Image (tube, rainbow, N blue to C red):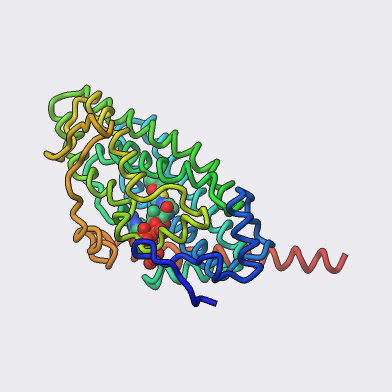
Amino acid sequence: MYAQMVETGLKKVRTEEDMSLDEAAFQARIDAGIKIEPKDWMPEAYRKTLIRQISQHAHSEIVGQLPEGNWVTRAPTLQRKSVLLAKIQDEAGHGLYLYSAAETLGVSRDELLQALHAGKAKYSSIFNYPTLSWADMGAIGWLVDGSAIINQIPLCRCSYGPYARAMVRVCKEESFHARQGYDIMMALARGTPEQKAMAQDALNRWWWPSLMMFGPSDAESVNSAQSTAWRIKLFSNDELRQRMVDQTVPQAEYLGLTIPDPDLKWNEERGSYDFGEIDWSEFHNVLKGNGPCNRERLRTRVKAYEDGEWFRDALVAHADKQAARKAAA
Ligand code: FAQ
């Protein structure tokens, strides 16, 4: 079945000649822009790729609550506190839609969580960095949610129906998140010299990790070619990263802040910014579990899961009781 493959960069993509009749029909539906739904036939590798990506995405949303959760009790005003709280609750909601979307592929939420808690499943590298000041709430909303939107808008048109539909609502909420982050940055940038310095420091620390969120360069992205053929990915990691830089530089200029990249330069010919080399050794180190907060994040998630066991048990007991009552009626 996997006899003939075509090399595309680092990744092997299945050609028409390799495909069974079912697989060729499946690929033709994807090429025609028809959504794949849970009960449709799909190649095992497509199912596995989606489970991998959607569950990593769900884990990112859930673990992603932790860096901001750190500042709920220290938000400077009641309004900032309620906005931040609402945003963090939205992230929990995103995790839940995404776990539900993954479950439509025949995997249970418990299995997915076990993989996360055992350190086997990935979540976004960005959430392994500490939040040292209130300005980090601004930088996360502006840069991290901003990057998430750029990555996720195309996913609203991806080939798998439940994932694409979940993304529509997620993207709407992410837009509010990015806006609230920029609003914090604006208040700080227009504040006292100390506040502006705090905003600059947050930008300095979050800029490069935000660029890393888009994943390895196209030349090193092992999953891109096949995911693109299956329309799980509509744009490459580098294309989306470039979009983020082009969109964000003018926003930084408006704030009067400096992007921490001496090589950043407008390229007249390309009509976009050239930017400096990303430190990929830092990215790989974070992925290996050695970022500044990896261990703390995982420990916190495992503890929250264990502490919530009584509540999950109560829900199941209640559901069982309801089902028994219905059956007896
Ligand atoms: N962190 O071959 P590729 C958010 C892994 S949500 C960790 O390019 P692919 C909202 C990748 O999994 C943020 N691992 O892989 C929020 C693969 O390893 P594997 C999450 C990364 O799948 C805001 C290996 O490297 N968003 O922020 C990362 O084609 C604020 C090779 O990479 C999504 O998950 C990374 N940054 O492309 C919440 C969006 N990058 O799995 C709270 C959906 C790569 O083979 C507060 N996901 N890796 O072992 C995607 O679009 C893709 O999965 C990519 C990676 C682009 C992340």
Query: Can you tell which quarter of the image residue 83 is in?
Result: top left
Q: Position of residue 10 (x, y in %)?
A: 34, 65
Q: Position of residue 261 (x, y in %)?
A: 15, 40
Q: Quadrant of ligand 1?
A: bottom left
Query: Can you tell which quarter of the image residue 189 is in?
Result: top left
Q: Residue at x 52, y 69 (%)?
A: 45
Up the image or down, 125 lies above or below 179; here it is below
Answer whether residue 300 is visible to the viewer in this image.
no
Q: Position of residue 29 (x, y in %)?
A: 63, 55
Q: Quadrant of the N terminus?
A: bottom right
Q: Quadrant of the C terminus?
A: bottom right
Q: Residue at x 49, y 77 (%)?
A: 3
Q: Residue at x 64, y 50 (%)?
A: 34
Q: Nearer the viewer, residue 59 or 281?
A: 281
Query: Can you tell which quarter of the image residue 270 is in?
Result: top left
Q: Is residue 323 left or right of residue 123?
A: right
Q: Is residue 62 left or right of residue 67?
A: right
Answer whether residue 53 is visible to the viewer in this image.
yes
Q: Residue at x 61, y 68 (%)?
A: 106
Up the image or down, 239 lies above or below 316; here it is above
Q: Nearer the viewer, residue 140 or 164?
A: 164
